[in-house]
Amino acid sequence: MSNSRPEPAWRVLLGYVRPHRRSLAAGALLSLATGATGLALPLVAQDLIASLSEDRAISGALLLMSALVVTNAAVGALGSYVLQRTAESVVLTARRSLTSSLLRLRISAVDATEPGDLLSRATSDTTLLRAMTTQSLVGLGTGGLTLLGTLVMMGLVDLVLLGVTVGVIALASAVLGVIVPMINRASRRAQESVGQMGAALERVLGALRTVKASGAERRERDAVHAAAEESWRQSVRAAKWQALAGNVAGLSMQIAFITVLAVGGARVATDAIDVGALVAFLLYVFYLMAPIQEVVGAITQYQVGAAAIGRIQEVDALPGEPDHSAAPLPAADEEPAAIAFEDVRFQYTPELPYVHHGVTFTVPPRGMTAFVGPSGAGKTTVFSLIERFYDPTDGRVLLDGKDVADWDIAELRAAIGYVEQDAPVLSGTLRENLLFGAPDTAEEALADVLVTTRLDALVARLPEGLDTVVGHRGTKLSGGERQRVAIARALLRRPRLLLLDEATSQLDAVNEAALRDAVTAAARETTVLVVAHRLSTVTSAERIVVMDAGRVLAVGTHSELVSGNPLYAELAATQFLSAVE
């Protein structure tokens, strides 16, 4: 994604509006028609007064006024509906664009950002575009044209009174010029505080069991309340400036009315204009209030929307992956993948220390390779670099002899099955989770994997079988069941390379043994890399890579490393002993 200077808010808004420009134009024309029928009313009123003073029939004028009022209401209602519908479509376009950007973000960008704040940008910030479309984009156009048309009609009635009115409007505009920047700054702070509140709440809900188990509800509640209060303060500050802008516009119209009444009364007394002209002009002054309020509202709402667009653009400026479509999964007869790391150095951010210090190893196609070492050795980072969640700071990661940076990212990931350390399960049914990475899987293949991962007994036990909803983050499943679901999900992709990050850590001995046999069988057909802390898993691997502090200390078999590498011998004698069956 681009890190260039952000585009002006109006240009971004026009980009969202462009697909809906026809319906927006139709709504704007209907609004202008509403304004035009309204502009005719004072002239009809002037004619009505003249007819009364000359003892002429007024039935025609009354019928015309009634028709104008009804037409004004009908056209206004239709125009309002069209504009609101278009505004909702603009919000939908913005949300589609933003969510696409969010899903393309690099993992490093997501790690550096609060998820709750990103959620706020996709929900509350995009909602502000609705009012920005109707009030700013359309309101400024229709309100401005109606204001101009009203001033022209006022000029036709009396130029002197027009000059008085324009003078008052100019004075109000100068005051608004000072207020408008305040609205933008206050709105930006208000929206940022909403994002901070969302981040605070997401933090609590994401670890609610820990919060409750720690007796920290009150403390966390106070933290969320403090964020909510800050959001309230900033929103009130923004509302204060918006209210001030609206009242300046209203006050200017009241001053204009009083001034026009005084000057107009003097002109009537000197016979410069008649009473009918003064009444018509005063009606125009009243009528002028609506387009002025519309223009002022458009300007203030633009400042609010511009702040929202600025936050949306910040997401677009975050580093992201190329836009890509899902690649087809590997065919059953495709060869397993080979992996190589060549002097790889890596740090998550420039200010953090290196995680890898020249990691080098080679994994041939087919078979199981286990990665062992103390916590913080950089084992999980190996998998993240293979998946291109991150790119090496130096060195190369090769898959089939080709730098992963040169692979199409969709094709790269289609070749890989990955089971994360915490084995996440998504909200939805068990079937949806199992088929998440391979939605076209046949029922027979699904049934085979259920047996392989020992999930068939779980499916038989669940009230709705595979169509049972597993809850938010799989809360209706045990930790071991979630791990088996994650393994089954990876196996269904028929990967050329299977990455298992402590994938059996929460399984009991019986299920762990069964899954180990399944992984061993898979290793005869594909390449398996596993981060493991259980001796039974490590000893079944063809090769073992020993890592410590971001370096590869040794590569070999279990028997070779027990006698030839002190760290591995210590791990085998201590850390792994608890897992020996």
Image (tube, rainbow, N blue to C red):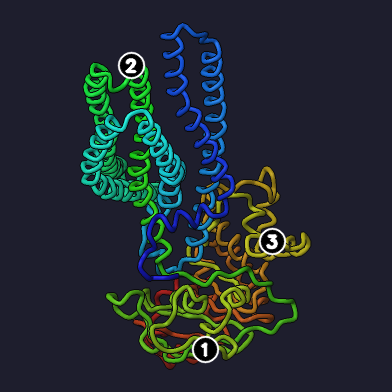
Q: Is residue 227 left or right of residue 209?
A: left
Circle 3: element type: loop
**In this rendering, which labeled residue sits more in front, label 3 or label 1?**
3
Residue wearing tag 2: 275
Question: Which amino acid, by three-letter code, is at mark 2?
Answer: Val
Viewer-side residue, 324 vs 282:
282
Q: Is residue 232 visible?
A: no
The tag on residue 439 is 3
Q: Which secondary structure, mark 2?
A: helix
Whichever of labels 2 and 3 marks the residue nearer the N terminus, that label is 2
Q: Quadrant of the N terminus?
A: bottom left
Q: Quadrant of residue 66?
A: top right
Labelled disc at residue 340: 1
In the image, residue 123 lies at what x, y percent? 45, 47
- Residue at x 65%, y 80% (from the top left corner): 526
Is residue 508 among the parts visible in the rendering?
yes
Please state if 489 lies on the left or on the right of 440 as rendered: left
